[in-house]
Image (cartoon, helix red, strand yellow):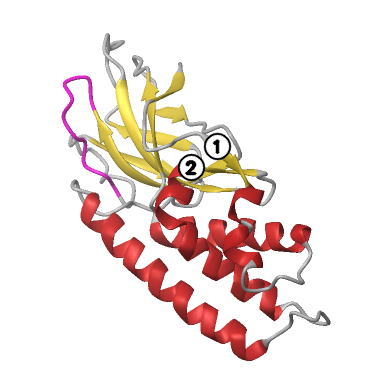
Amino acid sequence: MGCRTCPSEYGAALPLATWLPYVLSYVPDAPAEAAEHAIRLAAIDFCNETGVLTRDLLVDAMANVADYPLDVEGGYVIRGLKAVRDEYDQPLPLLQSLPARGSVSMGARLEGSSLLLVYPTPRVDLKEKWRVSVVTAPTPLTTELDRVLFDHYAEAIGFGATARVKMMPGGEWTDARGAQLFTVRYQQKRADAKARAQRNHQRGAVIAPTPRWA
């Protein structure tokens, strides 16, 4: 049972420091380490809320196997299921819950954050791999962010990080009013990105993971 990544919307990874000019230009006295931490948190929130980062995984569908572990590398976690295409490159329905007992309809769902369940169980090993598109986000331990986030959303993430830095207590850069201003700017950018991402999900809305054994 195999799962591997293939070309997707991911690009080269860039260090968090790449975003510093988008933050320190507004809070020049803030420590770089604090700014980088704020950038990380802003990027996590941005990806969780917008679904702008996706990755394609290739899965070997095998006889009598219904569950397939999914894995994304590089400091990211799976946040949702965007699409599953079978060996004929046809999309499978994305299920919110378990199918009814006795149902023969085909479908797939994401259980937990890393297990793909397919219905019904394949009867034979399939020669062609299934392509699984998942929505991802950085983890709190990431030290690099995907270049897509810089090329298209650097300003938005910079606004979110600046708001977080300005909310930090006890610093010369602390500015509650300024934090509110940058929060509003960030939220608007985030809303615009989410709307564009939803329009780009041509085969239905992203299905969020369901709790294990739900």
Is residue 90 in the magenta section? yes
- The answer to whether residue 138 is left or right of residue 49 is right
Decide which of 112, 203 is in the foreground and name it: 203
Residue 12 rendering spot, x and y as whole percentages: 50, 34
Q: Which residue is mark 1?
A: 13
Residue 125 rendering spot, x and y as whole percentages: 31, 10
Query: Nearer the N terminus, badge 1 or badge 2?
Result: 1
Q: Residue sitting at 48 percent across and 42 percent down?
A: 147
Q: Residue sitting at 64 percent across and 57 percent down?
A: 20
The residues bearing labels 1 and 2 have C-alpha atoms spaced at a distance of 6 Å
Residue 11 rendering spot, x and y as whole percentages: 45, 35
Q: Residues within 10 Å of mark 1 (few under 14, many from 20)?
A: some
Task: Specify the farthest residue to the right.
Answer: 170
Q: Residue sitting at 61 percent across and 82 percent down?
A: 179
Specify the label residue 147 is tagged with: 2
Which secondary structure class fits the magenta region best? loop
For residue 26, what is the image quadrant? bottom right
Q: Which residues are magenta?
A: 86-95
Whether 204 is drawn above or below 74: the answer is below
